[in-house]
Image (cartoon, grey):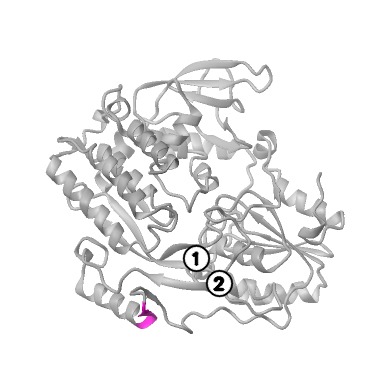
Amino acid sequence: MNRILILYILILCYSCSGNHSFNQEGTSFENLQLQKYSQDQLTADFDLMVNSLKEAHTGLYWYSSEAQFDSVVAVQRKLIKDSLNGLQFYNIAAPIVAYSKEDHCDIYLSDDINRRLNRSGLFLPLSVIHLNNKTYLLNSPVSTENIKGFELVAINGLPLTQLYERLFNTFAADGYILSSKYRSLDFRGLSREYAKVICQRNENTITVVDPLSKKEKTFTVASVLSQGLTNIHRQVSRENTIRREITSPAELKFLDDQTAMISFRTFSNKNFEKSNMRFKSFVDSSFKKILSGKVKALIIDIRDNGGGSEGNEDFLFSYLTSKPYQKYRYVEVSKLSFSFFDHTDYSSKEDREALEVELKFDNEQHSDGKYYRKPGRYAAEPVKANAFKGSLFVLTSGWTYSGGAEFASLVKEHTNAVFIGEEAGGGFNGNTSGTSLELTLPSTKLKIDIPILRFVLDVKKGEFGRGVIPDYSIQPTFEQFIKGEDVELQLAQKLIRSGIHNISQLITF
């Protein structure tokens, strides 16, 4: 066993030991009055989850070996005890799902636990933002002093660095990417995950650092119910001019007579249709306007793009290159049918047969015994004769994910575009996504999304297990963030004014 795995297992043991989950104030989640289960029920649910992941998750061993995965499973299985409730079991099961290292593979609480959390859950009265390797308060949870904008460094005596390690062990990201995990804890995220993973109690202590004096201060704060946390989030939204996502799925703007910006919040056809838009029509018309307007510099903003319908990312990319390219090295599916269908959203005979027909139509077995997509199925979009040939800038963040990240990878691999912002939240080499099976565990009713299609991009320039790394890594300061200053866009415009046209001309500001 390598040293990294040993360290990971030690963290898991600490995260799920009695000192964490079961014997500190509030950590048994008694306030929720949750149903308890026998050791046999929990073990059966656990084994069904593990075996289903092994059977169906095509990319389960992309970033870790089978032996490493089995070692983590063995550690977590030993933590199962009699009379644990569903939330305690979640904290045993979730690290297994997280170790898949695939953001499309997720675990969800049961409907009953969610209802009880919404009714009786105790949450930290905090809204936060993670910027430049620090976590800042977006609200002031104490009445004696305004500590909005202070850096949060500890909760209930646990340093935030250690707290994040424990939270990050319970949900996945692609490969070794952390940007998406930090983004998941922004605003209400930290309070919600803390209540699920660490503890729930009536009072908490928070330790903060004054940004002016640099001195630490500790305060006692009372927990709030779910509605109270929602009210805090609404107040933060009202009081700050935070950069908002565009309201439509996509938007074209001309920033000046030579610069245009296209923002894509999604690549989902359904979301476009809900807004009475068509993705391809929007892209076609946008580039027609860009080309007729003699635009010299194009900024593409995919900071809020979590992906969508397969093929839209390369339809957009087809307007940015004049050379033919291959999108995927291969697309692999684990199997053409699954033994645990009865516990999934494909439990009906009609649904499972329809899926089996689709999988057999799209895929074929090769000599290595594995199933791959048939040649010619979902081929890459042909390049356009009127492709954009000017300067290209791409804005990314930890929310740039799935198809959004695939688009970023294609642009990085095949163009000289300049990337600005934060490491993309989706893996540079591809992802395991597409069709997912939603597994519901029979006793605890926890739900696990298991993706079954591994999309391996035909790319070489990036770092394995990471997202696209920006050429200019930049985030706003806290003051810039609450004022809504778009520092990534500002930098792109500054580079354009300075005559920067591609990555070979990068300069330092």
Quadrant in the rendering for residue 364? bottom left
Between residue 253 and residue 132, name the one nearer to us.
132
Q: Residue at x 61, y 49 (%)?
A: 244
Disc number placed over residue 308 in the picture, else none: 1
Q: Is residue 197 left or right of residue 253?
A: left
Disc number placed over residue 280 in the picture, else none: none
In this orientation, does residue 202 appear? yes
Residue type, numbered disc 1: Gly
How many numbered marks, from 0 up?
2
The crowding category of the residue bearing disc 2, from other C-alpha atoms within 10 Å (few below 14, some 14 to 19, many at least 20), is: many
Residue 282 location (% of width, % of height): 63, 73
Residue 422 location (% of width, % of height): 63, 48
Quadrant in the rendering for residue 205? top left
Give the CA separation, mark 2 to mark 1. 8 Å
Residue type, numbered disc 2: Asn
Q: Is residue 406 left or right of residue 65?
A: right
Residue 220 location (% of width, % of height): 45, 17
The magenta region covers: 361-367
| Residue under label 2 | 312
Residue 174 location (% of width, % of height): 48, 53
Q: Is residue 151 left or right of residue 491?
A: left
Query: CB under 8 Å between callouts 2 and 1?
Result: yes
